[in-house]
Amino acid sequence: MEFSVKSGNPEKQRSACVVVGIFEPRRLSAAADKIDSATNGYLSSLLRRGDLEGKLGQTLLLHNVPETLAERILLVGCGREREIGDSQYRKIIASTATTLNETGSMEATCYLTELSVKGRNTHWKLRQAVEISHDTLYRFDSLKSKKEDTRRPLRKLIFTVPRRSDLSIGEQAIREGAAISKGVTLAKDLGNLPGNICTPNYLAKQAKTLDRDYKSIKVTVHEKTAMEKMGMGALLAVAKGSREAPKFIIIEYNHGKKKQKPICFVGKGITFDSGGISLKPSPAMDEMKYDMCGAASVFGALVACAELELAMNVIGIVPCAENKPDGNATNPGDIVTSMSGQTIEILNTDAEGRLVLCDALTYCEKFNPEKVIDIATLTGACVIALGNHATGVMGNHNPLIHDILNAGKSSADRAWGLPLWEEYQDQLKSNFADIPNIAGREAGTITAACFLSRFTKKYHWAHLDIAGTAWKSGTEKGATGRPVPLLTQYLIDYVTELAKK
């Protein structure tokens, strides 16, 4: 879909549809008031009759409104004016995109970006409008034999700014929103693919397409034999029960100075997680195709980074495997040696994500990274703690955690910090190896991060547990593409700080 920005009066727009807001109870927004004045009170008379109350998400489509140049006027309920925050604004834009797409307005000029949102500026409102519109209209139907095509889908959205001096700000916001949306769409597409299609080999091939599509990206794929030579015993232990060979994918984005230390993103790439010998219960096991959403988010963030041509160096590291039960599968109680040399007692084969991640985190050392962030659908305990609203964040460097949390606030892709105190490390004890791969039910999200921290001593590191945010269940089942917006915002902020030095 095409997005652009302009400035001008709503009653003078020659458009298939002009979109303006109505506040509760039956109050005109500034843009709606201009149309009302030009039409001798046409809109206010409708409101007095009770055609629209202005409640959040309500819509009313008008045709051939006199004294206007637009074919249609869409009135969108915005709730109470003083209560419009992030959540309300996102619902307003989502409702708008859905209505426009369903009512044949292939092109529209939207004045909702001029609404006042608590604590948010023009750039934020425009970028969010692009991202929300993309998100609302996203459909994954590539595997359906019969697709439900919209007859006249929305193809162009023009967002407005109150002053011509805001146009450059708006153009940059739309550029960022489009880049992030492209990354989110890729992450969603990969996440929504079933495990019989999206295998480790498939992810490796998709990474190679990035190499072809972007001059700034270079991709290397290590096979099983290379992993064996590097001593990745933990990762290989997970892959033992699968007939699908593991892959270790390196995506290098180099657009900064040669001596500039890179930011490393490490994404968990378990393309299907049955639990292995520690087999999961069957209800909702189909959703374990989403266990590679950490990997998908790394793909998406690198695409957004390349689209924006950010002046920095970023490395995506994606360890990929299937976790399956088999005669050759790893048993509970087996002990393996990780790439770091630390031995691990695998007490539960369903705690496999930390096993593939720990070898990838050790591998990061070769790049002498500035910062390392891993992203993983790691623990059900994080879903219990934070639900599906926030990503859990832990790490060994408070400034890094602070920057991630701020990026989450800025991008509306929220995260929340959890402690990583030394006392939690005491739960990770084994009688037979250096470390067990589980530490009991208590504080499961934190002790999983404690496990990973044993492999991150040589650099600043943060861990994002996205088990609650990577996908939705129920009637809206599907990948969310999170935390691509957060990760991209972190990179944008990082480049901004670099430019100040």
Image (cartoon, rainbow, N blue to C red):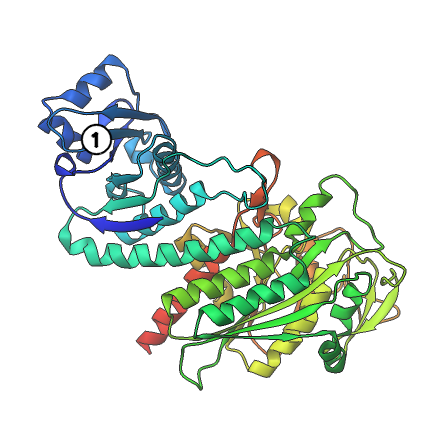
Residue at the image position 30 percent from the left and 30 percent from the top: 76
- Could you tell me if residue 282 is visible in this image? yes
Q: Amino acid at mark 1?
A: Glu
Q: Looking at the rendering, which quadrant does residue 461 occupy?
A: bottom right
Q: Looking at the rendering, which quadrant does residue 104 occupy?
A: top left
Residue at the image position 51 percent from the left and 63 percent from the top: 401
Dividing the image into 4 quarters, which one contains the C terminus?
Answer: bottom left
Dot 1 surroundings within 10 Å: few (below 14), some, or many (20 or more)? some
Position above or below: 47 against 421: above
Q: From the viewer's side, name the closer residue of 105 and 412.
A: 105
Position above or below: 50 against 19: above
Give the left or right position of residue 246, taking residue 154 as reference: right
The picture places residue 468, in percent across and down from the top left corner, at: 60, 47
- Could you tell me if residue 403 is visible in this image? no
The picture places residue 329, in percent across and down from the top left corner, at: 85, 62
Give the left or right position of residue 129, taking residue 30 as reference: right
Would you name the residue on which mark 1 appears?
71
Q: From the viewer's side, name the closer residue of 300 and 499.
A: 300
The picture places residue 15, in percent across and down from the top left corner, at: 20, 38
